[in-house]
Amino acid sequence: MRKERVLAVIMSVLMALSMLPITVFAAETTALNGKLNIQGIAAEGKTLSADFKEVNTEGMTEDDVTYLWSRKTFDDEAAENAGETPELKELGKEKTYTVTQEDIGSKIVLTITGKEENGYSGTLTVTSDEVVDAESGAALEAAAEAQKEDASEETGEDQTTDEESTDDQQDNADSTEDIDAAGTETVDEIPPATSDDQQTEGQVTEEQPEQTGEIQEVPTEDTLVKDDQMEDNQLTQADDSAEGEDKAGTETVDGIPPATSDDTYPTEDGNNGTTEDPSNENPSNEEPSNEEPSNKDSSNEEPSGGTQSEQNPDPATANQISVEGETQPQFSFVQDYTADDATAAQKKVTFKNNSDTAVSLSVTASGDENQAATAVWAEQTDAQTNTVTVDPGASATLTITPVTGLGANANPYQQTFTVNNVNDPAAMIATITATVTVQDISHDLTPNPNEPLDFATAKKGYSAVDAKTITYINNGNVPETVIMPVSQSGNYEITTEDSLTLAPNGEGRITFSVRPKAGLAVGSYTETIKVATKSGFEATTPISVAFQVIKDTATITKIQQPAAVSGLPNGTEKSASSLNLPSAVVIETTAGNMKAAVSWNVKGSSYRQSATEEQNFTVSGTITLPDGVDNDNNLNLATSIDVNVKAYSPKIASAENNIITGIDYNGVYTTQSKISFTAVGAGMDNTSPRNGDTRYEPKSWTVLNNTLGWDAAPYTASFGLAKSGDYTLKVNFEQQKYDGNSWQPTNTTDTRQVSFSVTKANVTAPGADLTPAISRTGAVKTGDSTQILPFICILIIAAGAIGGVVFYKKKNKNK
């Protein structure tokens, strides 16, 4: 029994140890590390995606992070530079983002965040260049392709040159070995070295015979110098040859005579004791310089005319020139605008040189320079070529000015300016597109309220009548100066406290106060008062006024029935003005017809604003007799008016407007792709439905005979496919009708579908399978990096111990 207890204790310990990975060790997360980049050109219409090539987080895939695309405007960047944290405009959370027109002039920010459930944490952020328009984007794309081709060609040439240089270096090394081996003996017909300072590495070359002026044998293939090498290394070859002369000593080697006292060779053609032939233009035969011999390439020597920076001070590239300001300036004018207007509307773009050398910038205009705008450097150094030189750290300002004299045009005028590096025209710095809109002159003075000023009736001998007001709004596109209107009959007084100069586009307005003059005789006074401006424009709606003076006494005899109001749109507001009810009615008196003010009881009418059916109703009112009119006959002073409001026309949604967005029709995706889409039902944007309205609500979607549904918005979904092939996504929409309280199904459905293809993906970066998680096979990553093999061994040992105990018991029983 004691042995069994000991074994039980041992098994318990082993079992506890085998459970440690689950109960003790917590799952770890890996922080994102490396540099995130954006793949694609930041231009309107282009699609950007994340570039993981420099993200070195081990095992991470593009599905182990979330994506956030944002827009950083110029103001955001300024706030950021001031130490603030701007709130960027969120653009999307998909793996890719397509640049829109609204992004032009801003920058796109991509932030990826590790999914903790997948074992990753932290964020990486990258900001794109400033977004340009589609035309500039195409130019940038073409320039990038051209640069890639040039780089490819240069790489090929460099490889060839490197190979040749390697061969030359190997030959020099072999020659050096021969020199070392020679010592004091003659090796391969080379005399012994004279002294250490005369023998330096690389001095012995196989081009020495070229200095004799004699016809030499053709060098072997290994020592043959290419044409381009000869051009680049002429000075070096001359120096090396001079070194060869020193090495020759006083003996004749390969037909080369000994050097003279002045280190020159005698000649056979009598050229004054030198090897230089006056007719020979080969610079390799020139007299060696007094400088220390060297086998370095002469291309590495500093030119005699000054430093490389002084001779060619323009190595600055486009990304070293920062651009601030509007690169898509918009100008809007009304025809016949002045030069002062154009100057006031100028836009400025600043170019800062962030390199360490001066750069010369030029600006050229496409097409006619005076088509729409001009561009001039404020610090211009060459007016003829319109160029400016910008020192390191300095800035140059380009002023964009619209030209005058442009006529009204349905299509805006455009002018494109290209800013280039003068010494490298292919290095385009920026493209600026100016747009000038010129409108026809429009005059419009609109009265409010747009109705006659009816002063009703006053009794003879009245002292004053209350004034009425009317406001005119300048809805034209040019400023207007109003001429103060006057009553042509002289029966009315017109005053204003507002300015007579009105700003355009609805901003300027003027209010006139109008009243009949006091002491008018018995009679009717009707007049039209015109409102005009100094530009010669006359308001199409003048001021219509009416006033009547009656005798001392008059008696009402009848109230005329006002004309009915009909054809009002359904849902018209329940008010006297909205229902177009008159403010006065005609009454008959012993002194003639007059107008009497009326008060309408709209609230007490049967009209229901929310009703969708046609409504015919009556609104009652009570008149107020004007001064000088008595009701001697005790007439009922009540009146009424009939009103008609049309029935509501339901908003019927069309199934043709059911669409699927986010997935391309006949698009091609890979097995790495996470395909996301959104179903948009027709009429789903109807947030204030009325009885009879219809809509189509997305209900379900199907791929590969698998159907999934939605219960409520948002109607989006994502999926991935691990097998290549052709597929179809189908979305089912259900028609619904609003019954006045809620949406009810009508048993009518509509199906929309999108065809697409999936191809096998090649894993490129960061070197892991990027197949969407929902379509992967295999174990799920937990983030626990604990090595479990030792615990598996312990578990096996524990199981063996249990088996041993069972065997031991059986053996004892058998005994």
Image: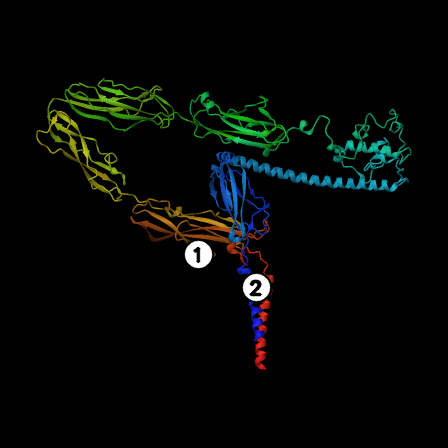
Query: Is 652 situated left or right of 455 in this image?
Result: right
Q: Earlier in the sequence, mark 1 or mark 2?
A: 2
Q: Is residue 69 visible?
A: yes
**Residue 487 circle label:** none
- In the picture, residue 379 is in which quadrant? top right
Q: Residue at x 58, y 79 (%)?
A: 812
Where, quadrant-wise, is the N terminus in this rendering? Answer: bottom right
Q: Residues within 10 Å of mark 2 (few under 14, many from 20)?
A: some
Q: Is residue 282 visible?
A: no
- In the picture, residue 299 is in which quadrant? top right
Query: Is 66 situated left or right of 207 in this image?
Result: left
Number of callouts: 2
Horizontal and vertical percent position of residue 314:
63, 29
**Residue 707 circle label:** 1
Q: Nearer the viewer, residue 742 or 667?
A: 742
Q: Please say if 467 is above or below 1.
A: above
As drawn, the residue found furthest toward the front would be: 2
Horizontal and vertical percent position of residue 603:
21, 39
Disc 1 element: strand
Q: Residues within 10 Å of mark 1 (few under 14, many from 20)?
A: few
Horizontal and vertical percent position of residue 699:
40, 53
Q: Nearer the viewer, residue 642 or 770?
A: 770
Residue of label 2: 17
Where, quadrant-wise, is the C terminus in this rendering? Answer: bottom right
Q: Give the amino acid at mark 1.
A: Thr
Q: Residue at x 59, y 79 (%)?
A: 811
Q: Give the amino acid at mark 2.
A: Leu
Q: Please say if 177 is above or below 260.
A: below
Q: Please say if 528 is above or below 19.
A: above
